[in-house]
Each structure stands twice: as structure tokens, then as C-alpha cells.
Image (tube, coloured by chain):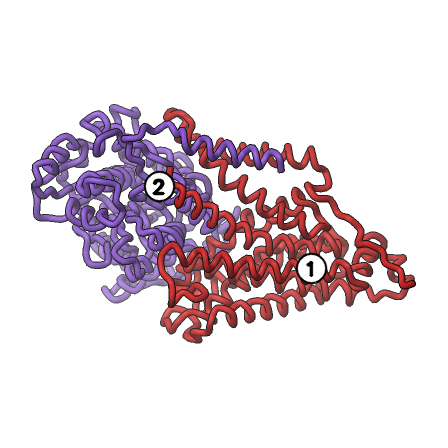
Chain colours: A purple, B red
Amino acid sequence: MKKCITLVAAAAFLGTSALAHAADTKIGVLMDITGPIANFIPPLQNAANLAVKQVNEQGGLLDGNAVAVYGDTTGSSQGAVDAAQKLANVENVPIIMGALMSGTTIAAAEAVSIPTGIVQISPTATSPAMTDLKDNDLVYRIVPSDNFQGEVLAKMVLDEGIKKVAVTYVNNDYGVGIGQTFMDAYKKAGGEIVAAVKHEEKKDSYRSELASLTKGGAEALVVIAYAGDSGGKIVKQSIEGGLFTRFIGTDGLRDDLLIKDVGADALKTSFFSSPTSPADNPAQKTLHDEFNAEFGEGADKAFVDQTYDATFLAMLAVEKAGSTDRAKIAAALRDVASAPGEKVGPGEWAKAKELIKEGKDIDYDGAGGTYDFDAHGDVRGYVGKFVVDGDSYKQIEVMQ
Amino acid sequence: MEWTGLFFYLVSILIAGGIYALLCLALNIQWGMGGLFNAGIAGFFAIGAYTSAILTTGESSKHLGGFGLPVFAGLLGAALLAGLMGWAVAKICVRLKSDYLAMASIGIAEILRLVIVNESWVTNGSLGLAGIPRPFGEYLAGRSADLVFLAYVWTIVLIVYFVAMRLYDSPWGRSLRAIRDNEASAAAAGKNIEKFRVQTFVIGCAVMGVAGGLSAHYFRFLSPSATDPLLVTFLVWVMLMAGGSGNNRGAIVGALGIWSLWSMTEIFTNRLPLEWITRSSYIRMLLVGLLLQVVLQKFRSGVLPEKSPPLRFRK
């Protein structure tokens, strides 16, 4: 108990003498750092840090520097609400970037962001439930809803000439969201689903699920799951058992870990869908070059673009609002993200700051897309088709 | 630093701490008083959470619902259903000795959780239930709603605390302690051991159900990510052990202390230098573990150890 009291006292002390200077502006970054998607996170933290670093090198945010303050949701609702409470109340941030999983994003938004009037902008939360939140125009995301990726994936599979597939998806908001829309769209467009199995995470063997999936003679297996968990194991065990040779995955499976686990040869005929940016987007190359120059590698990892863009947009919104007044941020965010306005790309903070100072309207077009929010705070997006190339992935086509 | 902000952070800690205090009190009745090793808290928590959420939300095409009952009725339903489920579980496995009961209850909790995730016509599966109301939510919005919810949670904590104190200092509670410490002699004294154990289990599970319901109303959105056994089962055990198993006040102190520790360590790790940023969340987990070690080493029977209820003789 004494320990605890010391801790409380020390926390209060730390709060008052935080590293940040008075003129600095904190940006809340909510991520599921520990927990089920932990292996996605390090490049995304780099992406957010890169955005903050560039802003500080090019004139800073408002009258001082920008400082990223992290909150770890631990991948659970309890942790998400707790971390968001700290960002909103202790760190007193004007805007929150995050979270990454849909479950944690919605819990943080419902329990904290909406009541405290903070704009929350998620780079990756794809649950269809976010569209209809009663959010007073405070909750945004810059990836399309799962409904969208599922539909595009169905088209992609049919375009490839595959008419009969087996589908397995992980039983969480991500897997069910994409899985259901994929199956509906695929059947509607004339494809045949010979077997569909919903599976649980964190099991060692998926052989019984695979046994029921092989019945019916599917040409390929659609796997909507994470490479670090069930998805990777399913692919590995189907190859070991000679059950399937062709796999179709989503962004959760498109992880270098998968190639490391099963080898590039085994995935020669497979392809993957993932939210991406338009094919000839120079902004993406700019970002990737800068990212790799800073961190050596990792710019092509899933959601690096979106995380960078969301962080950059969050800071643009604060700059546009001209203060950390939470009430002004939502309108400012819509302003800087949507057309019309002078185009600004990744890393062009100095230009953006100048334009805002002159009172001109800007329109941020990021590495991951153009981000024009609709009335719900959603965007339409691009989905890329990826194939294995060496020990990483190569984008070969983009669909809108 | 803004004082109103700090104040509302304290409020949020007390709300979450209050919900954990309920779970700890419930576990204290089961383990501290009755010696029943329930490692399936998450399962009863989940039943309570979903019951209350389904009873209070409006019509939806995605899950069972449309009852739109007031929050209090939802919580009552949560207690009833979790208690009923506790009764069924107790009937099957309460005769098992402590560690076997632990194994059985872990299994049952996982079964309950998986049923919830899979029966999506009832629970909307992993996509979750949205739009769960708060008590008196129609009159209040914004931050002040948190204050009302805080009062609501702690009223329930106090009621449960007084009930638990009454149970502890009653013939019923004494028999329970006798059974816990020496089953054979309690049986020889004519106590119906199984009946006492079933009652204990049911009371504890009902309170766990209420705690689940309160969490659902607090988050206003319920998905399976709220029933993670790490945060619901094991953290509660740690809280009770640190606070003092067998002591109701210890259960509340443990819940508040450990939750504050859990939450506040992040404020520290956020102040580490930039190069540490990708590691700070893991450092935080390490810190939590270290601090727990210190607490558990220094206070072996908890911060507030168990005391026997006072003896009073009729003159």
C-alpha cells in the first residue's frame, strides 16, 4: 500500500514536470501494443514517430513541438478504455490517433472520446459497426469498412478465374466482418463456396477444420486470419498435409512471417488482398523512401501508410484549428482531409503550415489514399492485390 | 496539467476499480470464505455482461434484444442468470477438491465464452453489441455522466460489501470457514457440506454477473475482447491475494490498489526517453509484475490479512 501511495505521489509529480515544454502539443496515439496483434505494431510506431519527427523538423506544431504520447490498449476493452482515459484526462491531448483493432477502437470511443469531445481517428479499424456510431462527428477512420474489402476480394478471386473456393475465417470482428461480406458477394457474382468454416484463434492444430474444408474439391482456400496466429498455422498445416496448394489471404495474412514459416515456393500461386493506395501514387514512394532512410526497412509492412497518414492528419487538424481547443478539431479535420484545397502530401509539413498561416484551404492526399470523409467519418478506399516476391510481397494490381 | 482532467482520470480509476472490487468481493466469498477455487470468473462475468446488455439495448436485427429495460432490471437479470449458471456448474463440480475445481471452472469459463462468441444470433458474435445505455443516460451526456456512473457502481459495491460483512459474521459464514479449514470435522458437526458450497458458489457467481453487467454499461459497447481471462480472471485473483484473501475490506483495497498500479505504470513508462518508445509498453508489463512481486513478498497474507469474526457469548 505504501508503494502504491508513493506511486500516486510520484505520478502526480511526473505529471506536472513532464518532459514536454509548455508550448509543446501532445498527440494521443492509442495502439494495441501488447496483446494479440503485437507483432504488427513496431513498424506502425515507427510510422507515427516519423510523422511527428518530420513535423518538428519543419517548423513544429502550433508554437512548439509535437509530442506523441502512447497509450497501450493491451488488446482488450478494459485496457482500451483505461488508456484512452489517461490520454484524455492526464495527458490532456486534443486529438487521438488510434486504436488499431475495431473492438478496442469502439470501446475507447464510446466510453471516452465521445463523452470528452475528443476527435478520434483510427488508421485500421474496419468493423462495419463504426459507421453507425452516434459520435457527434468525432470518430473517423481512414480505411474502408470490412464490407468493402470483402466485396473487392470476391471480385479479385473471380477475375483470377477461380469459381470454387473453400473459406475459413477467424472468429473475431475482423474475420467475421470480411468473411461474411466476401461470401455474400462471391455467391452473388456466380462463384461457388464448397465449404465455409469459422475457426478459433490460439489453437495448435487446425487439421479437423481443414478436413471439412477439403471436401467438395475447391480450387483454392480463402484464409481470413492473422499470419502470427491461426492463419499461418492453417496455411502451414494444409501444405504439410497436401490439402491445398493455392491460398487467398487478406491483409492479416500478408505478413513476412508467413513466408518465413512456409517458404516462398509454397506460396507461388497464392495472392493476398490488402488496403493500399492508388497504383501510381507518388506520395507512397515519397513516404516509403523517407521511412526506409530513417529506419532501414519496413515501409511496405501492413498499415504503415495509414498509420503515418492518420498521425499526420491529426497534426494538420490541430494546426488548422489553431489551438488545442477540442471543439474546433472535428471541423478542422474534415477541412484538411477533403477537397477542395491545395494538395499537400506526406512530409510536406512546412508547405502545409505556410498555407494554413496564409488562411488557404489545404487537402491532404496521403500515401494510403485521398481520404475524403463521408457523413459517417468513413472513406472509400483502394484494395491492392499482392503476390509473394522473395521474402516479401509485391503489389501487382489495385482495385477501387 | 489540468486539475479537472486529473479528477476525471481518478473517476475512471474508481469506476474500473469499483467493478474489480465487486469481482474481488465475489471471489472472496467463494475462495476467502468458502475455499472454492473458481478460476472461471471470466465466464460468469461474460454471462452477466451479455445478459444486462441484451436486456437493456433497443431493437436490432443483428442480435437478440429489443427489450429496452432499465439498467437496474438488466443488472438484476445478470445476477439471476449468472447465479443460475453458477448453480448448474456447482451441481456438477463443486464436490471437487480445490485444484480440480480450478481446472473444471477454467474449462467451463472457456465453454461459456466460446458459446457467446459463436451464438451470434444472440450476441452478434465477435462484432459485438453497440449502443448499450448507461443508468440515467437519457438525462446526462458528456463527462458528468461518468460521475453518476461512479456513484451507481459504488452504491452497488457498498451494498455487496455490507452483505458480505453480514455473511462473514454470521452462523452461515462461520460454518463456511469451518468447512474450508477442516471438512471432516465440519461434517462430523452435522453441517451439510455440499449445500453450503453450492450456496457459496451461487452467491459469488451472481455478484460476478453484476460486475459483468456494470462493465458493459460502462464501455457502452460489448465484444468478446471485454472478457479476456487475463484481465478478468487472473488479475482478480492477484487483487484478492494482494489485498488479503478472507478479508472483505482487503478485497476492496486489493482491487483499487492493483488496478491503480496497472493503470498508472503507463504514465511512468510514457515518460521514458524517445529511444525506448517501442519498448515502453513491455517495460510497463515488467513493472507491474515486479511491483506485484514486492507486494506479495512483503505481505504474504495480503495487505489486510484475514481475521476471525469476533466471538460473542450470550450472557
| Badge 1: residue crowd in 10 Å (few <14, some 14–19, many ≥20) | many
Q: In which image quadrant can residue A67 be found?
A: top left
Identified by mark 1, the residue type is: Ala
Horizontal and vertical percent position of residue A383: 23, 48
Q: Which mark is residue A92?
A: 2
Vertical position of residue A274 compared to residue B45: above or below: above
Three-letter code, disc 2 = Asn
Q: Are discs 1 and 2 less than 8 Å apart at CB?
A: no
Residue A398 visible somewhere in the drawing: yes
Residue A65 sits in quarter: top left
User: At 26% from the left edge and 37% from the top edge, which residue is drawn?
Assistant: A308
Chain to which mark 1 belongs: B
Which mark is drawn over residue B265? none
Q: Which residue is identified by label 1? A: B164
Relative placement, left or right, of B249 versus A289 is right
Residue A236 showing in the rendered view: no
- Quadrant for the N terminus of chain B in the image: top left
Residue at 62% across, 45% down: B254
Q: Is residue B280 left or right of residue A186?
A: right
